[in-house]
Amino acid sequence: MSLVQSSLSSPAITTTDKLNSQWLGRYAGPGAGRIILNVDERDTAYEGVAYLLPDDFKTFPASAASFRTTDKQTAHFQFRTTSVMPINPVSLFVEPWDKVKSHFGDNVAFSSYADVTGSVDGEFLKLSWKSDIDATGEAALPRSRADKPSELASLKKNWSEYKDYVGSLKGRRFLFRGQDGPWRLRTSFHRRGRADLIRFLNEDIKTLHSHLMLRTKHFFKLDIPDELGAFFNLVQHHGYPTPLLDWTYSPYVAAFFAYRHVIRENSRKAKADETVRIHILDQMQWKRDNAQILLLLFPGINLSIGEFIAIENERMIPQQAVSTLSNVDDIESYIRSRESDDKKYLSAIDLPVAERDRVMEDLSYMGITAGSLFPGLDGTCEELRERNFSV
């Protein structure tokens, strides 16, 4: 299992005018195809990587173009890419052209750089470019809708109906995720406004690893895929943003997480239409129909399911935890784009906030408490707070 593969300054810029986001769409020009643009905001500029994935991948090589803008102006900007590298069609690694050109005809040339111009106008990014070998292209890309309200139609059920419903499902076919509201599925990494996973690996993870190895008994070897996955899972469970999304095989553990941060006083005043949400993913069908590629830098859109080694992570087993690894900002839209009238992967159930006390009491009888799910001092204190401050 593998996890790693392989500018713009105006004081009046609003959130919708910013460039940092994930932009997905199509580009026109020679070797037309799909484009994935992952952009981060830095102190004085924007930077990131663009993946160009031609429809005719046997004739035109896919490429990864890294860039940094000169400032933070978005009404009109231009820059030269810092690098353009081909993607090996077999290994999917970004490699020098000398190692990739044998997969293409002798008359195929590859660019060294591209000059790019563009602008952000509300919800659209417009780009055009010309390379050193006169290859041109253009694209108009919509902004990610990951921060918009969910468009997933949900089932409305009370707690008793929910227990009956999940009891009828085939065990371990489905994954469950509890949330305290009807938010779109989105990793904690993307929720922080980040998109560039190359930066995440080269900067965030290296720094985090150097600090945490002073505090863990096990020395995580990040060049070993299973250990890298275990490291991601460990830091995710301790609050560090990663491109993992937590799920569980247990619909009741998911219910605990849905209600966990609902304040008791608020639940007693809750209106009938105030709900928490349980997402349900048909993981068996998803695996059958979609390649599972546990490559963090996979040059395409990817959502894969992984069960990582529980190194120094006592929470995984009691939480019946499993994770999805994704480079997609708007996971809900991506999953729905793969569905058809006769094939659905993702569904949701909304439960009343007002039933919070009843749910938590039932879960306690099942042995699902903060103390059992979070072994250690924090979990014990959280469980006893729930038990002793019930009025």
Image: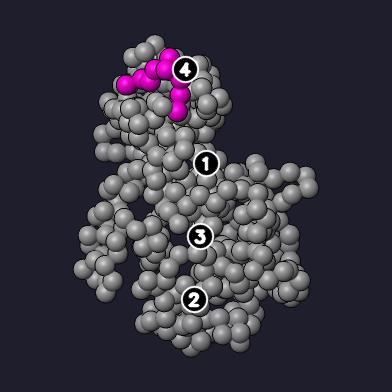
Q: Amino acid at mark 1?
A: Ile
Q: Indicate yes or no whether the magenta region holds residue 106.
A: yes
Give the residue pinned by disc 4. 137
Give the residue pinned by disc 3. 306
| Real-space CA distance between mark 3 and mark 1, rounded to the nearest whole angstrom | 16 Å
Judging depth in this view, the residue of 182 and 201 nearest the camera is 201
| Real-space CA distance between mark 1 and mark 2, rounded to the nearest whole angstrom | 29 Å
| Real-space CA distance between mark 1 and mark 4, rounded to the nearest whole angstrom | 21 Å
Indicate which disc, 3 or 4, sits on the residue closer to the N terminus. Answer: 4
* Neighbour tally class for label 2: few under 14, some 14-19, many 20 plus, Cα within 10 Å: few
Q: Is residue 37 visible?
A: no
Q: Amino acid at mark 2?
A: Ile
Residue at image location 29% in from the left, 61% down from the top? 221
Q: Which mark is residue 317?
A: 2
In this view, the mark in front (2 or 3): 3
Mark 1 residue element: loop
Quadrant for residue 183, please give it: bottom right
